[in-house]
Image (cartoon, rainbow, N blue to C red):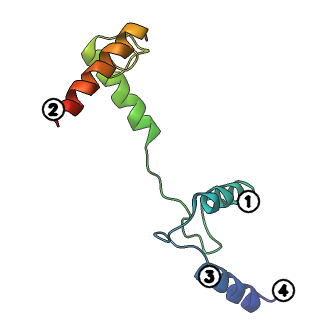
Amino acid sequence: MPPAVLRILNFKACRGAIMFGDPLLPSECCLIIEELKATSLCFQCAHGRPTTVPILNIASLHDELARLQMLSGRKAETWHGLGHHEPSLERAHMRLERLRKLRRGL
């Protein structure tokens, strides 16, 4: 294929593509992700533009969680109070009662 034709096809493909901010159905999002996973360059378009935006730096999150665990003195498997108490029927009843009181107060 001549390079000029390839450039035109690449340009048309990008202009017709879904852009950041375009509203999509959840099913469309899932389909796009599955199709991107099947490509060799899933993080950029034909022109090298990014196709994804990072929303979380996992290394930073891990460091922050470790810092919070050190400050709180809790065991490594608990974080920010999550998993601090064992689940029990008594605790579930207590929480439901608190919720009922809150609703009555509103």
Q: CA distance from mark 2 to mark 3?
A: 54 Å
* Residue 66 figure quarter: top left
Return the residue at label 4: 1
Helix, strand or loop under label 2 = helix
Nearest to N terminus: mark 4 or mark 3 = 4
Quarter of the picture holding the N terminus? bottom right
Q: Relative to 91, say whether 46 is above or below.
A: below
Return the residue at label 3: 16
Return the residue at label 1: 39
Q: CA distance from mark 1 to mark 2?
A: 55 Å
Q: Position of residue 86 (x, y in %)?
A: 42, 9
Q: What amino acid is found at the position of numbered circle 4 in the picture?
A: Met
Q: CA distance from mark 4 to mark 1?
A: 21 Å
Residue 87 appearing in the image: yes
Q: Nearer the viewer, mark 4 or mark 3?
A: 3
Return the residue at label 2: 105
Q: CA distance from mark 3 to mark 1?
A: 18 Å
Q: What amino acid is found at the position of numbered circle 1 in the picture?
A: Thr
Return the residue nearer the eye: 78 or 43.
Answer: 78
Q: Nearer the viewer, mark 1 or mark 2?
A: 2
